[in-house]
Every structure is written in C-alpha cells, then in structure tokens.
C-alpha cells in the first residue's frame, strides 16, 4: 500500500524522461524525485501539466474560432451546447477523474510508518533545525543535517520552538508545517542515495530564507555506521590551535548555549555541535563547511544571518577566532 | 430644440447637482466625484505596490543579492501583498462600482452618498498611514497573512499593529461601501428593471458585495483577537497559555479565500459588459452567468482549508476540501464559456478593451488550471508556499482582475473624461504587459517545483534558481513599462482632442446615456426599462430621456433626488431626497481613524477619546442628515406617478442598510463563537480543569435584562405608532435602563468570578464574548436614547419612524447576540 510498500525503488520512465528534458534536476527539485512520495507527486504533476496544456489549447482554439465568426452560423442551440458542455459537463468529468486519481495517492502519503521504522524528531527554531534520531537504539541529537537510509520509510515528528515553520525536502516528498504546542507528522521514503537539500517553506521571520539543511541518503550499512559515529562523544582535539579553541569555547560562554558531548559544554539553547566539523554546511545551509566558514560565522554572525539569536564574536582577536574555527572544524 | 421648460428644468437640476467650487469641492458626496477620487486613489496605491514589486525583483535578480536587507525585503513583500489586496484589488471594485452602478441602474446616485464619501476618506487615511509606514522602517513584516506567533510574540515593533488596526479600519470602510452597493443594486434601480433585467455588472457587484459582508468580519474578529494579544497579552494564539495559532489561519482564510472571488467576480463583470458591446449582441446565457456568479460566491466560502493543506489535517478534510476546491472551477468555466458563446454569436470588433479582455482571459485560464492542480491536496504538499503559488496567484489576479480592469479603463474612460484613450498607446501597453507578464511569472512555476520557497529575500547560487529568477526580474520591468505607457496615456494632455461622440462604442446599457462631456445630474430623467439593453431595444430612448419624458425630470426645490424601487420587480416606492455635500464625512473618517491610529501607538486613552468623538460626529451626521421629515408627504415624480417622500421599515433604504450591516456584525460575532468552540475542540485544557467560568447568576440576569430591553423596545415602537407619547417615553426609557443594566451584568459575570484574561485563553475568550455582547447592549442603549431625543425634537413621529424601525431591527440582533453569548459562556460549560 502506498508509500510503505516494499517494491524496489524505481523512477517511472516518463518522469525520468521529462525531468531530463526540462532540466528539472537539482538537489532541491520536486521534479527530480529521490523518494517515493516525490515520485508519485512528480508523476501527478506531469499528468496535470500535460492535461492543462491540452485544456488551454482547446479553450484558446475555441475562443479564436468564436471570434473569427466560425460559430455564427450555428444557432442558439449550439451556443447553449457550448456553455453546457464546455463550461459544465466536460470540466465536471475531467475534474472528477483528476480527483479520483489525485486523492488515490493521499492515503499512501498520510500512512503511518511501519513498526520499528526509523523515527526522527525535528524542531524548527529561528532559523535552524534541531534534529533528534529517536530510534533505533538510543536517541541522539544533531542539528541542521539529516542522513537517511535508502529504501527505508522514515517518520518525522515535527514541532516548532517559536514561530511557524515548514519542513520540506522537495526531492523526497511534500512539506509539513511545524507548530509551537502541536505535533505534526510526515512520512518520507528515500529511494536512492544522493545528496539533497531541505528548506523551511513557511515564512518564519527575518532570516526565513537562510533556514535550510543538508539531506544525505546513504545505503543502509553506511547509514548505520554514520549514526553510530554520531552517537559517539566529540573527538576533542589534543593540541594546537584547535585545542586552544576548545578552551576559548568554554571561556567565551559558548557552552552556555551549545552542547559538545564529551566535554563540559551542555547548553541546549543553540544547535548541538558535537560533530559540527563533519557537517556539510554551517549555520543551517548558509555557509560552506570548513575553517573559513566557521570563522566568518563567528565574526559576522548577523551579516551572514540577519536577526540570528547568537551573539557575534567579532570583538575577539583574529587569532582567537581562528582557534575557535579550528576547534569547531576538528569536531568531526 | 429644447423648450423653455426643459431649459428651466436643466438649470434647476444643474443647481442641485453641480459640485461645490474651490476647497469646498472636497465636501462633495456625489458618486461621480467620489467614485473618481476612489478609483484614482486605488490606481495610485497600485502603482506604489508595483514599485515595491520591482524592488523585490531587483533584490532577487541574482543569488545573494544585497540591494535590500532581509528586514527591508520582508517589509516590502508584506506591504506589496497587503497593498495590492486591501488597497487596490478590493477598493478598485468598490470604486468602479460607485462610479458606474447608479448609471447602469438608471439612478442619479447611490442611496447613501455620504456613506460612500465616508468610506473613501477612511480608505485614503488608512491607506496613507499603512503605506507611509515603510518610509519610517516601521512597516508590517509578517506577510500579508500575518501568521501568529510570529506576529504576536516575535515582532515587537508597531508594524503588526499598523497592519491589524489600519486594515481593520479600511475593512470597516469596505463593509460600509458594500452595504451601499447592495442597497443600491436592490433598491435604486430604474422602474421596470425587474430582477431578470438587471445588468450583469450589477449582479456581480451584488454578489461580491454580499461576499464582503460575510468574508471581512472573520478577519476583523481575528485582527481584534491578535491585537488584544499584542497590546494586552490576551493569549488567543499563544500555545503556552492554551491558545492556538491555527485559529488565526482559519479566520484569516475564511476571509482570504472568498477575497479572491471578491476581486475576480467584479472584474468578470466588466467583461460581461464589454464583450456584448463589441460582439454587437446581448450576452448569451444571462441566467447561467448569474447563477454561476452566485454559485461561485457560495462555494468560495467552503474552500478556505485549501490554504491549510500542510497543517497536518486529517485525510478526510483534505479530500473534502480538495473536491470542493475543484468544484469552483465549474461555475467559473460556465462564465468563461458564456463570454466565448457571446463572442461566437456576434461579430467581434477589435479594440483595446477587447485586446485586454482576450489577453486577460488567456492568462486567467492558465491561473485557473494551476489552481486546479493546487486544489489537489497531494500536489499542494509540494507546491504550497513556493514560487509555484506566486506564479499561480499572479496569473489569476493579473489575468482575472488587472487585465479586465484595464479593459474597463479603456472602455469606460470616455464616460469619466468625455474622451477616448489612445488606441495606439493602448495596444502598445497591452503587448508590453502581456509579454512582460509571461516572462516574469511563467518561470515562477518551475522555480517553485525546483524547490524555491516563497518570501525569501535571497537564494543560494547554483541551486537551479538563477536563470529563472533573472527572467522574472526582466519580465517584471517589461510589465512595468507597459503600465508606464498606460499612466502616460491617462495623464497626457488631451486638451486638443475633441470630446468623443455620445455612446462611442454603440453599447446597449444605460450608463451610455451619458452626454459628452458629462452632466453632473447623471441621467436627465430616470427611464422606465423593459429590456436588458434599453439603448438597443427601446426606440427613441435616448431622446425621451434627454427631453425629460421619464421620471424626475426636474429638481423643483433644487434638491438632489432619486427613485427607490422595490427589490424584485423594481416598482417605484419612494422619491428619495439625497444628502448634498458635507464635511461631516471626512471629519467622521478622521475621528474614527484616530481611534485606530492612536491605538497603533498604544495611546489607548487618546484612541478612546478620538473614538468617542467619532461616535459624536456620526450622531451629528445622522441627526442632521438622515430621516429628515419633509414639509410635504409626497411628490409628483412625473408620468402621473406620485410617490411618498418618507418611508420607513422594509420599504426604506435605511432599514435595508441596517439589516445588511447587522448581518456583517453577526458574522463577526459568530467568528468569535467559532473561536470558543474551536479551542474547546482542539485543546484538552479548554476550559482548564477546575477553572471558574463566568458563573450562572450574572450571565442569566444579563440575558433577561437585555431580552427585557428588546421587549420594551418593541413596545416603544408600538406606542409610537399609536401616538402615545407617555407610553413611548416610559417604554424606551425602561428599555435603555435595562440595556445598560444588561451590559453591566454581562461584564459582572467574569469579573465576579475573578477570570484573569491574560492567564489563559479560556478566561480571555469568555471576556471577549461578554465584552462584545456588552458593547452591543451599550450601542443599543445609545440608539434608544437617540430615538427618544428625536421624538422630543419632533424629528420622529408616529408615521415618520425610520429611526425607531431601524433601532428595533438593531435590537433583534442585540438580543440574539446576548442570548447566544450567555448560552455559550454560561450554558455550554454545564452541558459539555
């Protein structure tokens, strides 16, 4: 049934073909599906787009014919027939068929995950994502990056810590809004490995545009290895600039907001940074990874992300910033 | 060859209808003047909103643009959407209707000219206040949909208050205009214009205005709740204190979806006037169009949930609202095919209006088809809140509203200015706009499906958005160039251009009776109608009208007059004396506007003072200008017909206006009741365990007192009819006292049990409902006092009892409001 069925992942030929034709590919494209829901919906879209083109051409042709006077010889009966058939009967039939097809997809999209499926809670916060892998095994909290096993249904439990957000990975399926004080659910099932991008789709304030996240679909064994690695505490650098950065991290109060498991840092206000250096981007999909990115984020926080709650640290001497950036980069 | 009598008649009509000169011109209330100010202002706001759109397009021309800051961009997109919706799309419908509706109906003016003028001044004041805010970096930035909690707890500036209070003010003015248009269409038609002969434009205006009546109140109620949360901490949308942000979305979209049709229907209405003229034949499928328009209006109130498909609703709701949303395509399709059938039946002459009509429809059909896609919940999961929707809504609104409005501009411009706009410039403008529009908005569909969300001030390079986004920017500027051509065409000096001939398009409907240049009286004599296209069907029609051979050819007392007719078959029932120019209308707008503007800045004392002054001005306006008892009871209006000058109750326009206003008021009230039951349904802690309600004693006493006040009001009306002064004053005094007591008792309930409105949404909701009903009790008491004073002053008599009739009608609603309130706040907790 629907999404939870275990048939092998397969992109229907017309979709693949059409997607290739129109250059719809991309890590964030609903027309380049990498998940079961997105496949169904892309297929639905192409059918509807084709149908819409036919309808538009038919109406336009009819209108041109009418204006040219081709229909004038026909009497009042023909005019009434035009209104009845063109305005009412044909649209009713077409819309009825479309509803039957479109709504038949719905149960699959809304189905619950099978027991034992991977469960991930995501909380939207201005403007980043708190991600918690609830199962299997012990829970682990990450931020701004989601990795998923290919071919497995995943159930997301969605919340917001502040305003409304909306959780959307276009290549995997539809979006779902996130509310404070209310839980929503979303079932996704990636079908092929690859690197994708998710975004916040609901306007959520000043830096709504800068609230993205990386999504990586891995083969199952690789995913298991990654999750195990994420569960481990941070690999604290032993020497050099990075180690000094670790001291600065404590001295400048970073630990009040951020957790780095395995160190004394256990703040819960901001993103967990235990493996921040291993992530594919910085500041919720805003900066490229690496030392330079961390440095820029620390020094120019509000230039990078206007309105961000984190205070900027541009007042620190450059060598301290470099050391902090080195420390964060080392947290792989 | 005019006879001396006709010349005298004309000079008297001229004296009555000529606008005042100099600065007093702005006290004018006549529909032709007010309608033109209204339309011009709406176009100015349109240009302002368009300029904001260009700023956004510059910002999004390339990835990582830094033309605007994030904060500025968010203000710009919020104001763009809000201005286009609230200050252009809806006002332009009401503005155009104010100009042309009376002329199409063969009336001299709308029934309440001062109300139109008041509506205009409110609109101007509120609009300037809103638009001005962006120059002080204080504009709203919560999106035109203003979702809390972003707009309640996370935006501390005055921007959100400007939006909530400013637009509530404008919405109240829009409801006033709607009341005016509904009563105009129902009661001020030319004799003989039975309900099946009404011009289609008037039908559409009627439908759209009725929709305003039921669509705006939920938003006003929602805005009130949100402002109470912002200003006083009543937690309607704060989940930590039992509130729920979803209630806002329900109330907003209960307004927001019908609003689309409120914009679209009056624009189709223009096409329904234009197409028959250029096809040289009557519309095909008149009754199909009327039924479809009414059907669209009804259906549009059952679709709002399709704006909330991604909020996690159960599958049944999704399927149901998908089906309902698809269904609205059918009446829309019928209207479209009626226009095509009309074109097919006639011989279409090419012209700028027809160019904009054809272009508009071809664009609109695309928007309709993408709408069919979006209405399907599963597809909406992907496309919702992306640029796909931005593309869709602009195809709908520009194709379905802007292009038809521009068709209307080119078509109707001669009626306003006496001269035609340029065919050449119009054609150029059309092609620039048509091409620019498609270059700008077609790529947006693909942008959305490639994953670009809406309302983003920037986007990353290489995500597949760059080229499409740049195309949109280029298209937007081409579109803007087309608009600039139109602006030039309208503004360029036409001094050398001769006045065009009368009825230049050879149309068949009444508005084209107008002479070139126009005369201020509108129509020389009010004709008797027996077809839908009198200028085509009735021989010598123009001549007979011009020579004053129909009704009211004269203004013997040099006063403004028009006819009131019956609703269904347009039988003349009254000769209505219309009020003339007055500065009371801008004064009322200023004082009532003061309430909202001071409130925005948190100056609630000044706000209340200004509001009280506003109520005073309105009372003075009513006292001096309405229900005036004339020296003679009736009048010869021509063609051997004598009509009363004063009527009251259901024959009068005032009674209808009261009824219609109260329907809007009741809708706002029911929105609040909906809120109560919404919380009760979705929240386990509503009411919180062990919470005190308002008790039973005070609410029940309040309901009894207000019901008693209602009974005494009815008794007072009876005594007045019988001419029993003592009985009247005793009854009305008693009613007023009971009303005040009832209002106090309503508030005493939650007061006595110590309900603290900031602590939780439950006490806040109880207080809100009680306060709403109490305010109605107070207003009812004021109305009773007004009636008593009118009778003492000899301005209300046994026969001339319009004020009392209207007050009695008002009291039906007050009593119902009070009883329902008490049943909900005191009765329901016992039952639940």
Image (spheres, coloured by chain):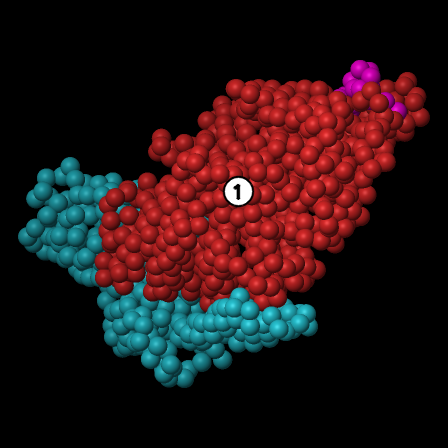
Chain colours: A cyan, B red
Write down the quadrant of residue A37 in the picture. bottom left
* Label 1: few (<14), some (14–19) or many (≥20) C-alpha neighbours in 10 Å: some
| Percent of width and height locating residue B239 | 50, 46
- In the image, B142 versus B774, the foreground residue is B142
* Secondary structure that dominates the magenta span: helix
- In the image, A32 versus B83, the foreground residue is B83
- In the image, B592 versus B410, the foreground residue is B410
Q: Chain of mark 1?
A: B
Give the extent of the magenta segment: B783-798
The reply, left or right, for residue B687 in relation to residue B474 is: right
Is there any visible trace of residue A44 in the rendered image? no
In the rendered image, which residue does mark 1 sit on? B500
Is residue A261 magenta-colored?
Answer: no
Relative to B590, say whether B32 is above or below.
below
Relative to A183, say whether B638 is above or below.
above
Residue at image coords 61%, 33%? B519
Residue at image coords 50%, 29%? B125
The reply, left or right, for residue B166 in relation to residue A235 is: right
């Amino acid at each position: 049934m629907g999404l939870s069925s275990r048939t092998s992942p397969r992109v229907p030929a017309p979709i693949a073909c059409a997607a290739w034709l129109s250059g719809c590919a991309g890590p964030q494209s609903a027309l380049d599906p990498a998940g079961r829901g997105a496949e169904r919906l892309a297929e639905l879209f192409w059918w509807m787009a084709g149908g819409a083109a036919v309808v538009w051409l038919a109406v336009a042709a009819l209108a041109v014919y009418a204006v040219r006077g081709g229909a004038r010889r026909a009497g009042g009966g023909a005019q009434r027939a035009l209104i009845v058939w063109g305005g009412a009967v044909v649209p009713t039939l077409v819309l009825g068929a479309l509803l039957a097809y479109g709504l038949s997809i719905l149960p699959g999209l809304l189905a619950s995950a099978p027991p034992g499926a991977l469960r991930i809670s995501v909380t939207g916060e201005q403007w980043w994502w708190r991600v918690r892998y609830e199962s299997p095994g012990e829970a682990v909290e990450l931020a701004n990056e989601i990795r998923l096993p290919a071919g497995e249904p995943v159930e997301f439990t969605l919340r917001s810590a502040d305003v409304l957000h909306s959780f959307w990975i276009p290549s995997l399926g539809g979006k779902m809004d996130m509310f404070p004080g209310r839980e929503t659910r979303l079932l996704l099932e990636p079908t092929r490995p690859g690197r994708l991008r998710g975004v916040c789709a609901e306007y959520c304030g000043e830096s709504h545009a800068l609230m993205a996240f990386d999504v990586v679909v891995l083969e199952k064994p690789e995913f298991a290895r990654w999750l195990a690695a994420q569960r481990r505490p941070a690999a604290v650098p032993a020497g050099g600039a990075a180690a000094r950065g670790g001291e600065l991290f404590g001295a400048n109060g970073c630990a009040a907001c951020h957790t780095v498991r395995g160190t004394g840092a256990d703040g819960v206000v901001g993103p967990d940074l235990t493996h921040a250096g291993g992530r594919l981007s910085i500041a919720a999909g805003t900066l490229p990874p690496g030392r330079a990115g961390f440095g820029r984020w620390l020094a120019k926080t509000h230039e990078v992300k206007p309105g961000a709650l984190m205070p900027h640290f541009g007042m620190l001497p450059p060598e301290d910033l470099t050391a902090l950036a080195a420390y964060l980069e080392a947290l792989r | 060859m005019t006879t001396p009598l006709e010349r005298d008649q004309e000079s008297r009509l001229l004296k009555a209808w000529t606008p005042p000169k100099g600065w007093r011109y702005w006290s004018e209330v006549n529909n032709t003047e007010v309608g033109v100010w209204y339309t011009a202002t709406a176009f100015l706001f349109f240009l302002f909103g368009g300029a904001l759109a260009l700023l956004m397009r510059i910002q999004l021309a390339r990835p990582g643009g830094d033309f605007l800051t994030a904060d500025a961009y968010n203000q710009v997109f919020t104001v763009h959407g809000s201005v286009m919706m609230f200050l252009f799309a809806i006002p332009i419908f009401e503005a155009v209707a104010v100009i042309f509706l009376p002329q199409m109906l063969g009336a001299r003016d709308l029934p309440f000219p001062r109300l139109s003028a008041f509506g205009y001044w409110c609109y101007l004041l509120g609009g300037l206040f809103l638009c001005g805010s962006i120059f002080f970096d204080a504009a709203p930035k919560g999106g035109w949909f203003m979702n809390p909690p972003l707009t309640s707890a996370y935006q501390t500036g005055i921007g959100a208050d400007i939006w909530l209070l400013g637009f509530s003010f404008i919405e109240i003015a829009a409801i006033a205009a709607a009341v005016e248009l509904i009563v105009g269409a129902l009661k001020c038609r030319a004799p003989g214009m039975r309900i099946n002969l009404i011009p289609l434009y008037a039908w559409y205006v009627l439908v759209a205005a009725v929709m305003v009546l039921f669509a705006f109140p939920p938003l006003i109620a929602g805005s009130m709740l949100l402002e109470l949360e912002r200003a006083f901490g009543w937690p309607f949308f704060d989940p930590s204190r039992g509130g729920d942000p979803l209630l806002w979305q329900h109330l907003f979209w209960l307004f927001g979806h019908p609003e689309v049709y409120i914009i679209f229907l009056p624009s189709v209405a223009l096409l329904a006037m234009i197409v028959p003229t250029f096809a040289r034949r009557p519309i095909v499928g008149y009754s199909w169009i009327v039924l479809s328009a009414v059907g669209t209006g009804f259906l549009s109130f059952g679709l709002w949930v399709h704006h909330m498909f991604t909020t996690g609703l159960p599958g049944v709701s999704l399927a149901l609202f998908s089906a309902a949303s698809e269904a609205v395509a059918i009446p829309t399709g019928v209207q479209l095919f009626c226009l095509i059938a009309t074109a097919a039946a006639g011989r279409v002459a090419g012209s700028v209006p027809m160019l904009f009509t054809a272009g508009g429809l071809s664009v609109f059909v695309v928007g309709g088809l993408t709408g069919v896609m979006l209405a399907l919940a599963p597809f909406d999961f992907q496309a919702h809140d992306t640029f796909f929707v931005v593309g869709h809504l602009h195809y709908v609104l520009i194709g379905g509203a802007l292009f038809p409005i521009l068709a209307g501009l080119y078509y109707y411009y001669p009626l306003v200015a006496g001269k035609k706009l340029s065919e050449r410039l119009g054609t150029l403008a059309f092609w620039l706009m048509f091409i620019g529009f498609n270059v700008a908005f077609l790529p947006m569909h693909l942008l959305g499906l490639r994953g670009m969300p809406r309302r983003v001030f920037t986007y990353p390079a290489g995500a597949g958005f760059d080229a499409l986004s740049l195309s949109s920017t280029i298209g937007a500027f081409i579109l803007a160039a087309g608009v600039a051509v139109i602006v030039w065409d309208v503004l360029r000096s036409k001094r050398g251009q001769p006045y065009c001939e009368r009825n230049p398009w050879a149309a068949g409907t009444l508005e084209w009776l107008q002479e070139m240049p126009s005369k201020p009286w509108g129509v020389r004599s009010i004709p008797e109608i027996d077809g839908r296209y009198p200028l085509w069907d009735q021989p010598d029609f123009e001549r007979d009208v011009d020579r004053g051979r129909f009704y009211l050819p004269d203004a013997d007392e040099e006063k403004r007059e028009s006819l009131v007719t019956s609703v269904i078959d347009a039988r003349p029932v009254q000769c209505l004396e219309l009020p003339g120019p007055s500065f009371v209308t801008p004064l009322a707008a200023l004082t009532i506007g003061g309430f909202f503007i001071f409130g925005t800045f948190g100056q609630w004392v000044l706000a209340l003072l200004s509001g009280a002054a506003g109520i005073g001005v309105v009372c003075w306006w009513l006292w001096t200008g309405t229900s005036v008892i004339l020296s003679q009871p009736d009048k010869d209006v021509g063609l051997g017909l004598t009509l009363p000058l004063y009527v009251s109750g259901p024959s009068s326009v005032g009674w209808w206006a009261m009824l219609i206003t109260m329907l809007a008021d009741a809708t706002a009230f029911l929105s609040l009741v909906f809120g109560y039951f919404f919380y009760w349904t979705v929240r386990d802690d509503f009411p919180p365990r062990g919470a005190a309600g308002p008790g039973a004693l005070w609410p029940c006493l309040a309901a009894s007192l207000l019901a008693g006040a209602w009974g005494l009001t009815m008794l007072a009306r009876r005594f007045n009819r019988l001419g029993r002064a003592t009985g009247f004053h005793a009854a009305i005094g008693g009613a007023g006292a009971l009303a005040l007591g009832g209002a106090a008792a309503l508030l005493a309930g939650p007061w006595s049990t110590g309900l603290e409105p900031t602590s939780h949404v439950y006490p806040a909701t109880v207080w809100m409902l009680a306060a709403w009903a109490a305010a109605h009790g107070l207003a009812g008491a004021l109305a009773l006092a007004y009636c008593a004073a009118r009778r003492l002053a000899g301005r209300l008599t046994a026969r001339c009892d319009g004020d009392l009739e209207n007050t009695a009608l008002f009291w039906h609603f007050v009593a119902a409001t009070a009883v329902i309130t008490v049943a909900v706040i005191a009765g329901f907790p016992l039952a639940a």
